Image (cartoon, rainbow, N blue to C red):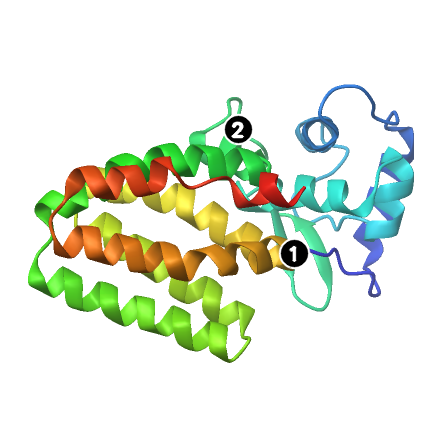
Amino acid sequence: MAISAGQGTGKASKADSVLPSVNRVSRQRLADQIISELQTAITSGELKVGDKLPPEPVLMERFGVGRSTVREAVRALVHSGVLRVQVGDGTYVSATPSAGDTLTDKIGRASVAELFDVRRAFEMSVASLAARNRSDKDMKRLREAASACEDAAEHDDPEAFVEADYRFHMEVAAATKNTLLVDLYGELRGAVRTMMREQPDVTDVISHHALALHTKLLKALQDKDSRAAERIWAATPNPYTVNR
């Protein structure tokens, strides 16, 4: 998620004057430290709701970090509702951070590799339960979503692929017939979808594995073979780690 370098308002200059006093970050996970510094600036009143963050290059210079680290920190704060992106303009403070981290906050700050490790563990239970509880209508929706993924891959359309893949896995979750599980899974899958949109290199790697994975899962769910469905995910490597 890029921060717009377009023309700012008067409030942007205020944010610009606040951030130079922030210490350059080091040692602990850089994105987390940037998040903490920005949250402190907001809760202290140095940055107020409605203020605009300076452009991405300025943030990189102020914190002494690279572009990807700044984007990761900003993305997490957007995901938690503290910041908002106004397309074509820039990133603004939209709320004061809450005292404690929510699950959504933590998911939003996770790295791609961390998300996929957690996802894989979660998917094992989701797929197993879906295989036991799925209906014929579930299978129809799953096949439609899988077909949409294939079409997107054939047309080299990453955005369509991300959406179709998200739909497929949410349909698997829906087939469990457990509404709490669907809600929890939706939080995780939403973060995965966001990262796939923002990191095309990760999406490219995942797309090579996803179609084969869908085919295997469809068969296990069609057969109502919960053990096979679980084993499929247990044997699936973290594609981000493999690509590193």
Amino acid carrying mark 1 in the image? Asp
Q: Where is residue 171 in the image (x, y as percent from the top left)?
A: 25, 57
Quadrant of res 113: top right
Q: Which mark is residue 192?
A: none
Quadrant of res 60: top right
Relative to 215, is 31 on the left or the right?
right
* Residue at x-position 41% and y-position 38%: 119
What residue is pinned by disc 1? 201
Q: Marks 1 and 2: in contact by CB < 8 Å? A: no
Q: Position of residue 82 (x, y in %)?
A: 59, 41
Disc on the earlier residue, 2 or 1: 2
Amino acid carrying mark 2 in the image? Ser
Foreground of the two, 55 or 75? 75
Residue 95 appears in the picture as rendered = no
Relative to 56, is 147 on the left or the right?
left
Name the residue at the bottom extreme.
155
Q: In this view, does 147 lie above or below 180?
A: below
What residue is pinned by disc 2? 98
Tag 2's secondary structure?
loop
* Residue at x-position 67% and y-position 55%: 1
Relative to 241, is 207 on the left or the right?
left
For disc 1, the neighbor class at 10 Å (few under 14, some 14 to 19, many from 20) is few
Q: Where is residue 187 in the image (x, y as percent from the top left)?
A: 39, 43
Q: Is residue 167 above or below residue 77?
A: below
Of the two numbered discs 2 and 1 in the rendering, the one whose residue sits closer to the viewer: 1
Real-space CA distance between mark 2 and mark 1, rounded to the nearest whole angstrom: 33 Å
Q: Position of residue 109 (x, y in %)?
A: 58, 35
Name the residue at the top extreme.
27
